[in-house]
Amino acid sequence: MKRFLILSFPVFTVFFLGCQETEKTEAVLLSAEEMKTMLEDKSLLLIDVRTPKEFAEGHIKNAINIDFYSETFKEDIKKLDPNVPVLLYCRSGGRSGKTAKMLQKTGFKKSFDLKGGILKWKEQGFEIIK
């Protein structure tokens, strides 16, 4: 009987822990086409993490500009509601990728990152607001 309990404990532990619900907070990379489709949902927050100068040169409609290089960037990001899904983009994906990782660490439930950034968005011929 002891041997049965000792051998079954690891199996029980793995089964029990594996069945617990875990929240996935990993950022999802989206193609420009997928991002365009997601933007139809007006409850999502679209954030452009480029500089204000880059933003003024052209951005995706309804985007909010939060400059990645700003001294207040981390504080600005923390002001956002972590329960609202966030769509991120930058020029080519570097800054938005770093922002997505930051959001994960601060408890955001869902974040999405535009693969290839606004360069890929433009390449696909999607609308840019100036």
Image (tube, helix red, strand yellow):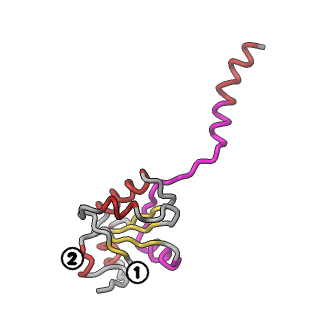
Query: Taking 101 as reference, is 17 left or right?
Result: right
Up-down relation of residue 22 to residue 27 (above or below):
above
Q: Residue at x 41, y 64 (%)?
A: 79
Q: Residue furthest right?
A: 1
Q: Residue furthest left?
A: 53
| Foreground pick, 40 / 115 | 40
- As helix, strand or loop, the secondary structure at mark 2 comes to helix
Q: Position of residue 75 (x, y in %)?
A: 34, 60
Q: Which residue is mark 1?
A: 62
Q: Mark 2 or 1 closer to N-term?
A: 2
Q: Which residue is mark 2?
A: 53
Quadrant assignment for the N terminus? top right
Kind of residue indicated by mark 2? Lys
Q: Residue at x 69, y 20 (%)?
A: 7
Give, as a single range, the part of the protein colored magenta.
13-42
Query: What label sits on residue 113 in the rendered view?
Result: none
Q: Position of residue 60 (x, y in %)?
A: 36, 79
Residue 118 counted in the magenta span: no
| Foreground pick, 105 / 13 | 105
Up-down relation of residue 89 to residue 129 (above or below):
above
Quadrant of residue 50 within the rendered picture: bottom left
Q: Residue at x 48, y 61 (%)?
A: 82
| Foreground pick, 90 / 44 | 44
Q: Position of residue 42 (x, y in %)?
A: 51, 78
Q: Residue at x 40, y 81 (%)?
A: 62
Q: Residues within 10 Å of mark 2 (few under 14, many from 20)?
A: few
